[in-house]
């Protein structure tokens, strides 16, 4: 369980005390504030704070005095226009702050998104909890046979059992020794900044992560994608639901132009024109490599 | 006057409608929201939105569940510790969004601070107003005779009068021609994206500028400094007052460790040790250049 | 003429003295080093330094010891793969430093690309030259009647003549007064940091601009695009030629996947599938707005 | 040994083939190119490429046509001036690319410096080597009793032996199981992107890291500092030696103004003035907290 009863009580207390503000309030994300959305076996995402809403995007785009809202349909149209033409700065005018609990190997992918602010739990200063990500049976996937960087079907039977035993056993033993090494009971105790090196990459860490909406969309496009590793994708998917409630018009445009769309190359565009003109185009006549042609055909379903 | 009666009415309306939120509310900056703080002859700064407060800095530093406040003195002490040891990430957890009206030559300095989000009024798309910065008599300064990059005493008499006449006359004529060129009355009208090139750098522009507190402090340290050009310094000073009301503990630490402090070089530190030990240190024995020694003596008053 | 005979002599001297290095050398860009590529009436772009080549992109992608080149075709294939799948970090491993002379209103667009390093000629410290961008007759365009943010056909006859007279006359007069105001001949002289505000936005400035290849491609995609303002597009086009000589494989992939390609929305992709299946799709049945449908049809030629 | 004989042969080959270039060449860093500087038990730092030298810093500061060198003493003086007055952009005009092999827990600290370009060895795609950081006896330090975030004296005797046994044994066992899990010998084999989660944080990874000189100095100031964790400090110290050879004037200024200097708070500056005037200042009369006063006294030796 990612959240203890004490933590839940604290969350409940935070959620019970609204305060008046003159700022823009986005009701859809207020409903999420502080609550822990569970992800993986011990992880979560919590919205800690936010700034702006759909209207704030339009307001910045118009650099106007007013609220930026002419009418909902106008705003939604403007937002679609901005997204379609890569006018990214108005989306940077919204900001969100999250509290995330996640395995270290996921954190290592996540941190590569540089345009964000981060405060991570310090294992130099503090002691990490005994919590490790152990995949559910259906997520214990074999190496992909077609993609060096992907996974295939779930392992089964003895192989699956052995893997689970290794993951659990090694995590437990490494953590036992971590605890023993830092213990100051009858010994000096190894420095925490050194002892942490004995913990495997499925140990959970946590951080505060603050990002603007444009960069969050970039993160979601890459990490909610079908090619992202499952263990980070589930975080991205949980965030998609939050963003949809927060800025529905912007999220709708993002879904249409980024997530659900496709990037056509000049060659791909040329092929489509020829196909629409009735020509039978093959990989050979497309000018594409085999891999690229396979992806092109996948795009066209 | 920077704000029209219509704009003021809109500001008053925005300030009259508090909405409940579950987020952290910082009363000191709520009092500033939307109001236009006048700067220079036609400029202003307005706070449009903000995220976080002093407690949010501590909360991130502790990556804790709670509000991060043990007691006010604890929080202030932690904030001073963070500032003193250059732990910058917790300060990045606060964010502010401003609407600024400013002359173009000030905007050109300001934009050099890259870690911020900007939406500027587009003179490709829209028509700029007839508003130019004309310095007040006491700000019409002569070139400094000691500093290539600074200014001296105000100009006086005929010279001052001639300068004012040039600035006013050229701005007026350039704007008249700008209007004539884009006019579509009996002619095609020059493209706005071209016509704007006729406007001098004291024309006012405006933008939305969003920045985190760490980077805002960096901006303020450089631009509220005595060596900054007066015309940007007055914006920085207006912002200092806002930040002081918003995050009083962080601003206090910033004043002590950044604005009011000094950076000692190894040579300077060595000189101070020798001076405290009773040695008479001169420029020659200091190892410093003349300019550096002058600054060192200036620092010690 | 953008470059004086003295400057040309200096460029020739720099180009005559090769030095041995152990670093990767890219012959295609060595041929450009230091030479001024003329842009607009007084502007230029000069390559001052560079780091890396096509092989360096592959080397970083492979994090290998060797040069990263298996064979040219392999490298080109890998580069296409990286570009197609938005693996941007290997392209960040190449870097280029430029010296650019450009009108201030172009500089103000350019600087919005934040992920770059800039040193601009300081008009606080130094005196600007009497050089202004005056459009050639064919570039003196009317405001677009369909696009608020664009231009139409060139002005003609009396209107064109009047515009040119205004642009030239105002620039000359503003510069005369700039010179008079800063003159210390028989007067104190206005501070340069103030006097510069009298200069219109078509005055030339110059800067050193350093950027990595990924961010340069992003700049080129937006600024070499047909919708970019002509006066910045010509700089982008000059840079495209440099980049093509520098990293031909990466530039080829950029042309195919970014410049020549298209972004399909989910709706657009759906329309194409339906059209390929023989359905007659109209704006009404497309789910697109009129503007979007017009762009969609434009894309399909 | 961090480098195999094959790798050393490749490095020797790269170092034996100078090519003529028209670019600025910095002899001091050419001598380092490609060679592996050993750090910790299996790590290293290798310079892969660089751009610029001391003169390039001055050239950018002057935005001049020429090489920027008036005379060495002039350049060194200008560089000291730039460093003293926080003119950071000219230092951004130099760039360096490194190949670094380092333990994962060091990589996790390092990556927090966001203004840099990184390509890391992918454990989704490839198989990590069996190499783990095991501290030398003198680096097997106890937790500090005064600093929650630091280390004390080396562990001794049985405790040290037990810690070493844990670190070595757990690393070996985790790696054995990692190998077994990904093996496709008689089984499907776990996906590499999952299996890597079983490896502890002292496993070695490697990356290409490219950074400009200003941001490198910032990294070095924090990571070559006495308070940095030993395991990252040794990398920073190795880099200090490289930078000193590369840009000796800039490094000298960095040493004087950043590494060897001190930041005085307003309170600290006030205390020094009072002490120089003969007053006996105590913690009570200083206005500082106990911790701050201790640091202040430490600074004054």
Image (tube, coloured by chain):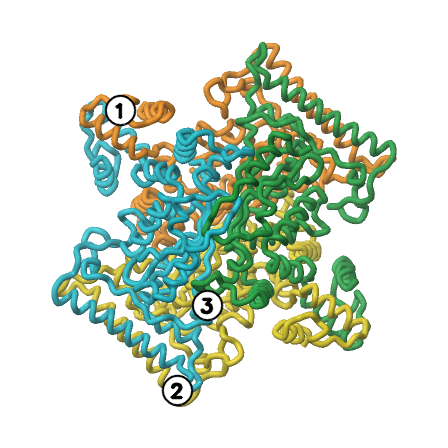
Chain colours: A green, B cyan, C yellow, D orange
Number of residues whose C-alpha sits closer than 10 Å to that of mark 2, classed few (under 14), some (14–19) or many (20 or more):
some
Q: Nearer the viewer, residue B85 or D163?
A: B85
- Mark 1 to mark 2 CA distance (whole Å): 76 Å
Q: Which of labels 2 and 3 is toward the front?
A: 2
Taking C181 as reference, is A110 left or right? Answer: right
**D198 w.r.t. B44: above or below:** above
**C22 w.r.t. C135: above or below:** above
Q: Nearer the viewer, residue C20 or C280?
A: C280
Image quarter where the C terminus of chain C lies is: bottom right
In the rendered image, residue A9, in percent from the top left (x then y), is placed at 60, 33
Identity of the residue drawn at 47% across and 68% down: C232
Q: Which of labels 1 and 3 is toward the front?
A: 1
- Mark 1 to mark 3 CA distance (whole Å): 65 Å
**A148 w.r.t. B125: above or below:** above
Taking D72 as reference, is C184 left or right? Answer: left
Q: Chain of mark 1?
A: D
Q: Are discs 1 and 2 both within one chain?
A: no
Number of residues whose C-alpha sits closer than 10 Å to that of mark 1, classed few (under 14), some (14–19) or many (20 or more):
few
Is any part of residue C204 visible from this angle?
yes
Task: From the image, tell me which residue sits under label 3.
Answer: C37
- Mark 2 to mark 3 CA distance (whole Å): 32 Å
Q: Are marks 1 and 3 in contact (CB under 8 Å)?
A: no
Number of the label disc, if any, that sits on residue C159: 2
Q: Are marks 2 and 3 in contact (CB under 8 Å)?
A: no
Task: From the image, tell me which residue sits under label 1.
Answer: D285
């Amino acid at each position: 369980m990612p959240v203890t009863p004490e933590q839940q009580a604290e969350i409940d207390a935070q959620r019970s005390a609204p305060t008046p503000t003159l700022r823009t309030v986005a009701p859809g994300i207020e409903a999420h504030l502080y609550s822990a959305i569970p992800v993986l076996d011990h992880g979560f995402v919590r919205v800690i704070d936010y700034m702006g809403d759909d209207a704030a995007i339009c307001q910045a785009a118009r650099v106007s005095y007013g609220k930026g809202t002419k009418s909902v349909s106008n705003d939604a149209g403007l937002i679609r226009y901005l997204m379609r033409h890569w006018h990214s700065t108005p989306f940077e005018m919204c900001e969100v702050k999250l509290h995330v609990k996640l395995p270290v190997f996921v954190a290592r992918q996540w941190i590569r998104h540089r345009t964000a602010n981060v405060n991570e739990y310090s294992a130099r200063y503090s002691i990490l909890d005994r919590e490790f990500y152990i995949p559910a049976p259906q997520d214990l996937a074999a190496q992909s046979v077609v993609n060096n960087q992907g996974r295939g079907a779930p392992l089964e039977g003895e192989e699956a059992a052995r893997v689970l035993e290794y993951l659990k056993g090694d995590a437990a033993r490494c953590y036992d020794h971590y605890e023993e090494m830092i213990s100051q009971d009858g010994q000096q105790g190894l420095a925490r900044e050194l002892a942490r090196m004995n913990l495997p990459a499925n140990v959970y860490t946590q951080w505060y992560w603050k990002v603007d909406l444009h960069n969050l969309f970039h993160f979601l496009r890459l990490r909610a994608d079908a090619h992202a590793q499952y263990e980070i994708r589930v975080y991205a998917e949980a965030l998609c639901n939050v963003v949809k409630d927060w800025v529905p018009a912007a999220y709708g445009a993002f879904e249409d132009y980024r997530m659900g769309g496709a990037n056509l190359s000049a060659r791909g565009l040329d092929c489509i024109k020829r196909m629409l003109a009735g020509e039978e185009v093959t990989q050979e006549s497309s000018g594409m490599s085999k891999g690229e042609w396979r992806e092109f055909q996948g795009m066209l379903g």
